[in-house]
Image (cartoon, rainbow, N blue to C red):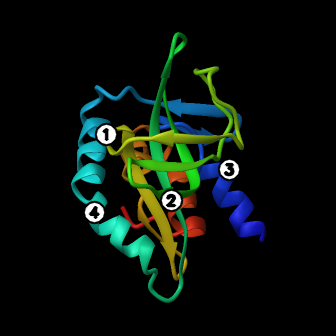
Amino acid sequence: MKLTAVLTLLLLTATANAQVGDRMVMARDENPAMAAAITKAQASLDTFLATSAKPPAGAGMFRLKVKITDENGIEHMWVMPFEQTKTGFTGTIANDPQIVESVENGEEITFKRADISDWGYVQNGKQKGSFTVCALFNTMPANVVKQYREQHGFEC
């Protein structure tokens, strides 16, 4: 349970944001590494959705990162749990917004495939997906990246 809570705090921050100690690491969608991460996540989304529909042994914490826009700006937020519907997806916002004010942690939302910017899950202690978090490793202190890799199974 403790690992799940820590992982949630580390992974469920907005896209282009990652909690590092008492500060947030941020990158814009236009950042080349972040743009490439979003493209990679979108290109592999069908494989992820098939995996989440029939999870392999040792897999859990399936989540999607969704682009939310309101008059305050744009923020990408983790949604967990989620489910696919006939017209798109529904799910629960799983982190506190830092920019947008139109949603809040724990709120159920509906969204379309085009709004998905990342996906992730844990299998046998290793992170799968979470490409936007991996993109932030380029801007994070080496000791923090090492901690993410060792304690949370990032292999990117």
Tell me the distance, in whole angstroms, between the alpha carbons under discs 3 and 4.
26 Å
In this rendering, which labeled residue sits more in front, label 1 or label 3?
1
Query: In this view, which residue lies farthest toward the top?
Result: 71
User: Which of the two discs, 1 and 4, labels the residue nearer the N terminus?
Assistant: 4
- Taking depth in this image into account, of 78 and 129 the one nearest to the observer is 78
- Taking depth in this image into account, of 64 and 155 the one nearest to the observer is 64
**CB contact under 8 Å: marks 1 and 3:** no
**CB contact under 8 Å: marks 2 and 4:** no
Residue type marked 4: Asp
Residue type marked 2: Glu
Q: Is residue 127 visible?
A: yes
Q: From the image, which quarter does the N terminus lie in?
A: bottom right
The picture quadrant where one finds residue 135 is top left
Tell me the distance, in whole angstroms, between the alpha carbons under discs 2 and 1.
15 Å
**How packed is label 3: few (under 14 Cα within 10 Å), some, or many (20 or more)?**
some
**How packed is label 4: few (under 14 Cα within 10 Å), some, or many (20 or more)?**
few
* SS label for mark 2: strand
Compared across the picture, whether 134 is left or right of 60 comes to left
Residue type marked 1: Ala
Q: Which residue is mark 3?
A: 9
